[in-house]
Amino acid sequence: MARLLILGGTAEAAELTARLAGDDRLETVTSLAGLTRLPNVGSGQIRRGGFGGPDGLAAFLKDGGYDALVDATHPFAAQIARHAAEAAEMSKTPRVKLVRPPFARTAEDRFVPVADMQAAANALPQNARVFLAAGRRELAPLAARHDLWCLVRMIEPPAADEALPKGELILGRPPTDPDAEIALFKAHNIEWIVSKDSGGRAGAKIEAARRLKLPVVLVERPALPKGTTVESVDAVIAWLESTLFGG
Ligand code: NAP
């Protein structure tokens, strides 16, 4: 049986393991960073925690006799993507990067593209009322802007020593219904949205911004390492077929 390591923590990684579950030519292990309390895991074997950098991952791939590596981590998880590329090179393991396409742009969007969270903070006008959905350790640039009022939504609670921007914090997953986001934005007189371009189907937040004609400061993705990159689970399965089974 061929052995496959999937770097996960995304819906796509969970979908991939579910799709591969019935394939008896393959044994899959999904690796999670281990930070999230409620990870999206899918099926198959799971391992958790960092590898200790590219060398650690290269050793893990070799010692575990892995035949291929699928990096299906989040488009903003730049460090693990770089480590995966380096480790695959060192251990001579075929690697593919699965990354969902950026948000589709429409004529109604008022996107202000920026390179990172610091640039997002710089792009906001004085005294703006802002909504943002954020991960841990992403808030420092906004917290430093004392004139802003921010409604922050986080899935995981902020780290104990993390500075929060002035405003309100909501803990929880995003709603799927744009009407719920519209109601939230109206209730807090939100004028600006800050969002990472996480890609895929633009969620309720972006749809709500569109309908309310609110400007969105859109943080663009970090650059990907060189190498094979695909945008769908189907394309990963085709890559596995040709890489592992010569199909
Ligand atoms: P990151 O900054 O690129 O990675 C930080 C370190 O975490 C890596 O160097 C690696 O440690 C470890 N790591 C990350 N993903 C791992 C995995 N799947 N398995 C084992 N170790 C992993 O990543 P991040 O932005 O903190 O994201 C962590 C995880 O959350 C990723 O797996 C990602 O798919 C998921 N996620 C991230 C976002 C986001 O917006 N960044 C959103 C949703 C989900 P070592 O160097 O010790 O190996």
Image (cartoon, rainbow, N blue to C red):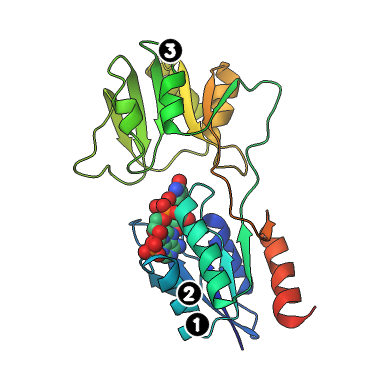
Tell me residue 130's x, y (percent). Answer: 40, 21
Mark 2 secondary-structure assignment = helix
Tell me residue 145's x, y (percent). Answer: 31, 20
Mark 1 secondary-structure assignment = helix
Image side of residue 155 versus residue 223, left or right:
left
Q: Which residue is mark 1?
A: 62
Q: Amino acid at mark 3?
A: Pro
The residue carrying pointer 3 sits among few (fewer than 14), some (14 to 19) or many (20 or more) residues within 10 Å by Cα, namely: few
Q: CA distance from mark 3 to mark 1?
A: 51 Å
Tell me residue 164's x, y (percent). Answer: 26, 31
Determine which of the numbered discs, if any, sits on residue 74 in the image: none
Q: Amino acid at mark 1?
A: Lys
The residue carrying pointer 1 sits among few (fewer than 14), some (14 to 19) or many (20 or more) residues within 10 Å by Cα, namely: some
Q: Is residue 208 above or below residue 159?
A: above
For this orientation, the residue located farthest to the front is 90
Q: Nearer the viewer, residue 91 or 131?
A: 91
Determine which of the numbered discs, if any, sits on residue 58 in the image: 2
Q: Quadrant of the N terminus?
A: bottom right
Q: How many marks?
A: 3
Quadrant in which ligand 1 is drawn: bottom left
Residue 139 showing in the rendered view: yes
Image side of residue 92 versus residue 125, left or right:
right
Q: Quadrant of the C terminus?
A: bottom right
Q: Nearer the viewer, mark 3 or mark 1?
A: 1
Instruction: Assess whether mark 2 and mark 1 are in contact (beta carbons under 8 angstroms).
Output: yes
Determine which of the numbered discs, if any, sits on residue 125 in the image: 3
Mark 3 secondary-structure assignment = loop
Q: Specify whether tag 3 is near ligand 1 (CB below 8 Å).
A: no
Q: CA distance from mark 3 to mark 2?
A: 46 Å
Q: Residue at x 68, y 35 (%)?
A: 104
Write down the quadrant of residue 166 in the picture. top left
